[in-house]
Amino acid sequence: MDKYECPCGYVYDPAVGDYEHGIEAGTVFADLPEGWVCPKCGAEKEYFYKAD
């Protein structure tokens, strides 16, 4: 599962999810809800890029 990084430095790791915002571990980036934003800075999904 690919990790995606926000320009602010936050990395979304599907193995971890985003528990504080109701995203369970195992949720791939493409399956995140439309309204999900970076929990660190509030950036929308479109600004994330695939992390190395």
Image (spheres, helix red, strand yellow):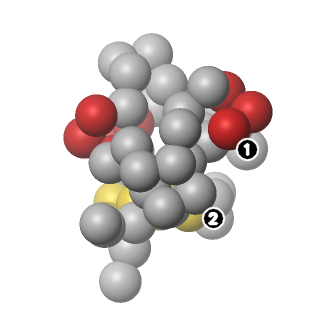
Q: Residue beneath label 2, please? A: 9
Q: CA–CA distance between discs 1 and 2?
A: 9 Å
Q: Position of residue 11 (x, y in %)?
A: 56, 62
51 or 24, which is in the foreground? 24
Q: Residue beneath label 1, please? A: 40
| Residue lying at 30% horizontally and 66% vertically, measured from the top left | 1
Q: Position of residue 3 (x, y in %)?
A: 40, 66
| Residue lying at 66% horizontally and 27% vertically, measured from the top left | 21
Q: Position of residue 41 (x, y in %)?
A: 70, 40
| Residue lying at 39% horizontally and 43% vertically, measured from the top left | 27
Neighbourhood count class around disc 1 (C-alpha, 10 Å): few under 14, some 14–19, many 20 upward = few
Disc 2 residue type? Gly
Find residue 10 and report its image quarter. bottom right
Q: Does residue 45 lie above or below 7 as drawn?
A: above
Find residue 22 and report its image quarter. top right
Q: Position of residue 4 (x, y in %)?
A: 40, 60
25 or 8, which is in the foreground? 25
Q: Does residue 10 lie above or below 45 as drawn?
A: below
Q: Is residue 48 shown to the viewer in this render?
A: yes
| Circle 1: element type | loop
For the view shown, which residue lies furthest in the top direction? Answer: 35
37 or 26, which is in the foreground? 26
Q: Pointers 1 and 2 in contact (CB under 8 A)?
A: yes
Mark found first going from the N terminus, 1 or 2:
2
Q: Is residue 7 shown to the viewer in this render?
A: no
Q: Does residue 16 lie above or below 25 as drawn?
A: below
| Residue lying at 34% horizontally and 60% vertically, measured from the top left | 49
Disc 1 residue type? Lys
| Circle 2: element type | loop
